Image (tube, grey):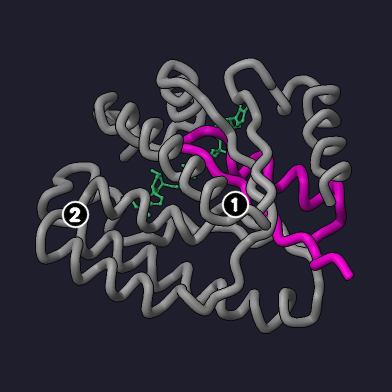
Amino acid sequence: MKPSPFIAVEGAIGAGKTTLATMLAKRFDFPLLKEIVEENPFLDKFYQNSGDWSFQLEMFFLCNRYKQLEDTALKFVSRREPVVSDYHIYKNLIFAQRTLKGAQLDKYRKIYHLLTDDLPKPNFIVFIQADLATLQQRIAKRGRSFEQDIDPGYLEQLIEDYETAMAHIKANEPETVVITVDGNAMDFVEHPDHFEQIVAEIKERM
Ligand SMILES: Nc1ncnc2c1ncn2[C@@H]1O[C@H](COP(=O)(O)OP(=O)(O)OP(=O)(O)O)[C@@H](O)[C@H]1O
Ligand SMILES: Nc1nc(=O)c2ncn([C@H]3C[C@H](O)[C@@H](CO)O3)c2[nH]1
């Protein structure tokens, strides 16, 4: 029997993960697991001074996602029920490897593996690939005040880090289906046919 779809939508900051995950959950009538951003007490501090706040921020994201995914495992995955999420747990490492260094990164990695190694992992990843200009336009369009001065260098590094991470997943997890969406050309918000192309590709691989 095929496993139930556990679909994670991924991509760099502002790529359109929450938007696409919400549309997919509605279209397939699957429950949606959504990251809560507004209640994060460290995010605006991190964007003002990343050096002082990165460890607290990464640990906060990790603990929240761990708890959310533990609940998801019990409620859906263990009951063979499908679910769509607007993140993959692996994103914690993608960001932490960029924002932490030395002993803090070593400690973080140990805690990450301790908390997440036995969590169920998505069997589908929809990866929205978008370039710097697209990310900047979307971040501006969404208008969260604390994100308006994000260093373009940081976004560029994350774009690269995501490419490396997806290549790593493809090479090491052949059972995970990775569907790459061209987020610059595919406007699934304005063009229903673009959205239908993504839906068709997921259905074909389900
Ligand atoms: N394909 C698209 N075409 C045009 N606008 C889009 C598209 N996808 C998302 N947007 C818009 O871009 C903004 C960012 O989208 P969204 O919040 O879904 O990104 P995200 O990847 O979840 O962001 P974050 O990394 O911060 O969690 C929103 O204003 C959304 O309406
Ligand atoms: N440093 C860091 N680590 C993470 O794990 C992480 N996940 C998301 N984000 C940032 C991107 C958006 O601004 C905002 C909403 O996604 O939060 C993160 N930042």
Is ligand 1 within 8 Å of the beta carbon of the residue shown at mark 1? yes
Tag 2 or tag 1, which sits nearer the N-term?
1
Question: Taking 12 as reference, is 32 above or below it?
Answer: below
Which quadrant: the N terminus? Answer: bottom right
The residue under the point 46% across, 75% down is 117
Task: Check disc 1 and give the amino acid type.
Answer: Asp
Question: Taking 123 as reference, is 117 above or below it?
Answer: below
Question: Taking 141 as reference, is 206 above or below it?
Answer: below
Residue under numbered circle 1: 86
Q: Nearer the viewer, residue 35 or 172?
A: 172
User: Which portion, as a residue range, is magenta?
Assistant: 1-30
Task: Check disc 2 and give the amino acid type.
Answer: Leu
Residue under numbered circle 2: 100
Query: Alpha carbon of mark 1 to alpha carbon of mark 2: how far?
Result: 23 Å
The residue mark sitting in front, 1 or 2, is: 2
Where on the picture, by quarter, is residue 102? bottom left
Graded by Cα atoms within 10 Å as few (under 14), some (14 to 19) or many (20 or more), the crowding at tag 1 reads many
SS class, disc 1 = loop
Spot occupied by residue 128 in the image (x, y as percentages of width and height)? 58, 34
Magenta-colored stretch includes residue 14: yes
Is ligand 2 within 8 Å of the beta carbon of the residue shown at mark 2? no
Q: Taking 62 as reference, is 150 left or right?
A: left
Ligand 1 falls in quadrant:
top right
The residue under the point 28% across, 54% down is 96
Graded by Cα atoms within 10 Å as few (under 14), some (14 to 19) or many (20 or more), the crowding at tag 2 reads some
Q: Taking 105 as reference, is 77 left or right?
A: right
Q: Residue 136 carries which label?
A: none
The residue under the point 42% across, 61% down is 39
Spot occupied by residue 124 in the image (x, y as percentages of width and height)? 69, 52
